[in-house]
Image (spheres, helix red, strand yellow):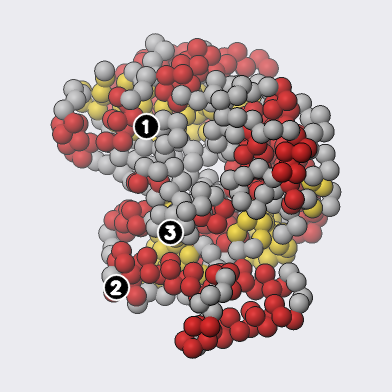
Amino acid sequence: MGDVYVLGISGKFNQASQRGEGHHPSAALLKNGRIVALASEERFVRVKYAVGHFPVHAILCCLAEAGITIGDLAAVGWSADPYRALQRWADRSYRPAKRALVTLAGAAQRNETLRKLFTVASSQIQPWREVERQRAQLYDQFGDAARRIPFICVDHHLAHAASAYYASGFDESTVITWDGSGDSITGSVSYAKGGRLHLLHEFDRFSIGDFYYAIHCFLKLSDEGSLMGLAAYGQNRGLLAGIADPKRLTMDYSYIHDDATMVSPKLIARLGPPRREDEPLTDYHRDIAAELQDIVEAFGFEIVRRAVAETGCRNLAFAGGVALNATMNGKIGRSPLADRIFVQPEAGDGGGALGAAYVAYQRLGYHLEPEALQHAYWGSAFTDDEIEATLRTVKVRYHRLDRPELIESAAQALVDGQLLGWFQGRAEWGPRALGARSILADPRDVASRDRVNSAVKYRDHWRPFAPSMLAEAGPDYLEGVFEAPFMITTFPVKTERKQQIAAVVHADGTTRPQLVRREVHPLYYDLIQRFAEKTGVPAVLNTSFNLKGEPIVNSPRDALRTFFSSGLDRLYMGSFLVEK
């Protein structure tokens, strides 16, 4: 019997929306149930999130990594199930007319004459049209070979749950998903054991993700993640009291506009005029962000408390966009509710591609056991020959270094206060740079932090940066530390260590580290270790290698363009050093 390849994809294509039902297109490839490659479309098309794009470049990347063609796939899983979404829509109201309409829609799926009667109906009750639209993208891009491949719809939150559980390495786990919405629900709780996921609860009476986005639109920050950083500068003054009830797990949706790009009139009546993008941030704005973070954490703790009480299992696995809230993750992970915690590094919609691949593999009849995701380096890679060809084409001067020279040169440059572009190995999966497509600086001096903000990232001066730290140094620098390889949880920094890593300590005294192990990324580990030998500090400031508003760089050409468009001093790319 030959190898079984299953492709997972995420995204809803040809959609103009910039959020919500657009979802982020990505691709994931499994070989016999194990990861071969993971890639996000935004990295290739150079459009942030790439909403509305079909992940053709991400798919090609995955196929190339495996050395196969589209015709070698046993199945394609898609992280959406319009039929399940329609059924939930019907179940939410027990009106006979609605149920009859859903029954008729199911019949129309199999009957061409009935389908014609639905041509003027809402797309919500024509789920086959949405599925056909997605399949048509495959056919258009890959031809007849794609038509023979089973196309498996996977419920959005089941895909999230699978991406968390099967990558956690936990045989038994309480699995929680939470986001804006997907397939008519906003979150779920499952119990998993022995390779099987059992759904316990679905949420639709609140949406942490939609409420978060509503406040983001009100404050008009550069991105949603900024809210978590801004919260550290404010105080909870009850400005949002009564909108959400964490104890009951309910929310007043009238404060969340149906059009996600607009602010609800009711929210404006409560908080006043929305902030203009060119308006300075005030204490009032900071206090709104602080209260929002408190509400998010209150919902998170209540959901986890109820879930653990029901399952009796304190191994927690999270996915969904809300799982990117590193402050909440850290607090839950250090609480008595958790023995161990795993957050899937591409927790947002793009991560659904991995979950869809896992579920599709199972639906082919194969058993799947959880396997711990040790790293996130699953994307594009470039050989030294390919990098050098680009350098010659672009006609820039460069030096070739052997490995010891590269480490020594980069470490000394950091000690000297220089800002480095670091482009090594396969690209990371997810929104965090983890030493493959990174910008690096000295973590000891806040001046280096400010310079990265002003000369490279061009973003708000108050936004925090994170460190990449030797894993064994974690207990010496951080309070309550546990395994944290993906820069997706925060920890309080020990008082006596704050000054040593001042550039990566946030206003609330926490930091969001990547704990680096040599067996996972030996080159990056050795660089940090050499910096530690020179300075006594076993960490570097690490942020994503991109300019504001752009995806993380993917190719050598992307890296060179970003390098020469910013205040970076040096670029270390493969075995090569580029200077200005």
Residue 299 rendering spot, x and y as whole percentages: 76, 46
Q: Is residue 395 left or right of residue 210?
A: left
Density class for disc 2 (Cα within 10 Å; few <14, some 14-19, many ≥20) is some
Residue 176 rendering spot, x and y as whole percentages: 67, 54
Residue 189 rendering spot, x and y as whole percentages: 70, 59
Quadrant of the image containing the N terminus: bottom left
Residue 383 makes an appearance in the image: yes
N-terminal label among 1 and 2? 2
Give the amino acid at mark 2.
Ala
394 vs 533, nearest the viewer: 394
Q: In the image, what residue occupies the spot 48% across and 73% down?
A: 129
Density class for disc 3 (Cα within 10 Å; few <14, some 14-19, many ≥20) is some
Q: Which mark is residue 145?
A: 2
Residue 472 makes an appearance in the image: no
Q: In the image, what residue occupies the spot 49% across and 88% down?
A: 113
Residue 223 lies in what quarter of the image? top right
N-terminal label among 3 and 2? 3
Secondary structure beneath disc 2?
helix
Residue 428 lies in what quarter of the image? top left
N-terminal label among 3 and 1? 3
Q: In the image, what residue occupies the spot 54% across and 79% down?
A: 118
- The answer to whether residue 458 is above or below residue 251 is above
Q: Which mark is residue 14?
A: 3
Quadrant of the image containing the C terminus: top left
